[in-house]
Amino acid sequence: LTGSSKSRNAIYNKNEVVLCKLVDGKKEEDWTEWYDNGKMYTSVTYSEGKRIGGTFKSWYENGDKWMETVWDDSKKKEKWIHYHIDGWIDNEHFVDNNSNKDGLSIIYDKYGNKKEEEIYDMGIKIKSTFFHSGTDFKRLEFIYENDKVEDSRSWYKSGNLKSTCEYSLGRVHGKWKEYYETGELFMVNNWKYDTMDGMSYCYDKNGKILRKYLVENDLIVKKYKWKKKLPYYVPEDYR
């Protein structure tokens, strides 16, 4: 369609042409939009004014695919797939009948590796998982309750546990524990609502205390034991 070939079933916007069909004021069948350069913008199918799941598609102005939906009959949900302008899948997620994210959502890098996974329940996030670059190994994970973080943990690239952290009302509150990659407890800090506050301990791999000190409002106020020369295997950041 062009601006000179108007139809009663076409709506002309500022930069787009929409070919559509209305029955008793309700959208019906295929609705299609074009960019003003003639490239297709969107395509979607309606029935009695409601969009049919799995029929929406859109394209970038250069003609490459931008978004598409797929109906998953086993889940009775619609999957949305978003493409990067360079062609690779950027992210995909499921939605419920109210268009809220529901179930698994995945974000990818340009090589097709997972960067992040999220789990939703009717639009409310309940878990986020981040991955080590180029692998399926978890790097960091947050558990949510009432849309606030209630627990987190991290892992080394080997898959071994690196840290655990307690939360209250979405803020770091309680014990933050760090582990050596070989599994032994390395450090314990106490936190009060995003501020380090309380006794802190640093251990060697045999469970012997290397450092014991009191922290108040993020500042070390007293050292009960402070071994200056730490074993070679203690992480460099803590030396």
Image (spheres, rainbow, N blue to C red):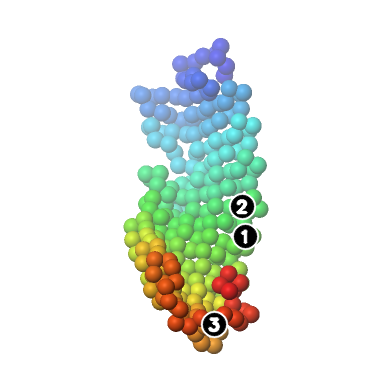
Quickly name the residue at label 1. 133
Q: Provide residue 187's location: percent of width, then percent of height.
A: 49, 77
The correct choice, above or below, for 144 with respect to 223 in the image is above
Secondary structure under the numbered disc 2 in the rendered image = loop
Q: Is 10 placed left or right of 49 in the picture?
A: right
Q: Residue, x 44% and y 82% (percent of image)?
A: 224
Task: Identify which residue, 224 or 133, lies in the foreground.
Answer: 224
Number of residues whose C-alpha sits closer than 10 Å to that of mark 2, classed few (under 14), some (14–19) or many (20 or more): some
Q: Quadrant of the C terminus?
A: bottom right
Q: Amino acid at mark 2?
A: Asp
Cα separation between marks 1 and 2:
9 Å
Q: Provide residue 2's location: percent of width, then percent of height.
A: 57, 16
Secondary structure under the numbered disc 1 in the rendered image = loop
Name the mark nearer the viewer: 3 or 2: 3
Quickly name the residue at label 2. 109
Q: Provide residue 205's location: percent of width, then percent of height.
A: 56, 84
Quickly name the residue at label 3. 227
Q: Residue, x 66% and y 53% (percent of image)?
A: 111
Secondary structure under the numbered disc 3 in the rendered image = loop
Q: Amino acid at mark 1?
A: Ser
Number of residues whose C-alpha sits closer than 10 Å to that of mark 3, classed few (under 14), some (14–19) or many (20 or more): few
The correct choice, above or below, for 144 with respect to 177 in the image is above
Q: Provide residue 157's location: percent of width, then percent of height.
A: 60, 68
Contact between labelled residues 2 and 1, with CB atoms less than 8 Å apart: yes
Q: Quadrant of the N terminus?
A: top right
Task: Identify which residue, 51 or 165, lies in the foreground.
Answer: 165
Residue 121: quarter of image:
bottom left
Sequence-first tag of 3 and 2: 2
Q: Amino acid at mark 3?
A: Lys
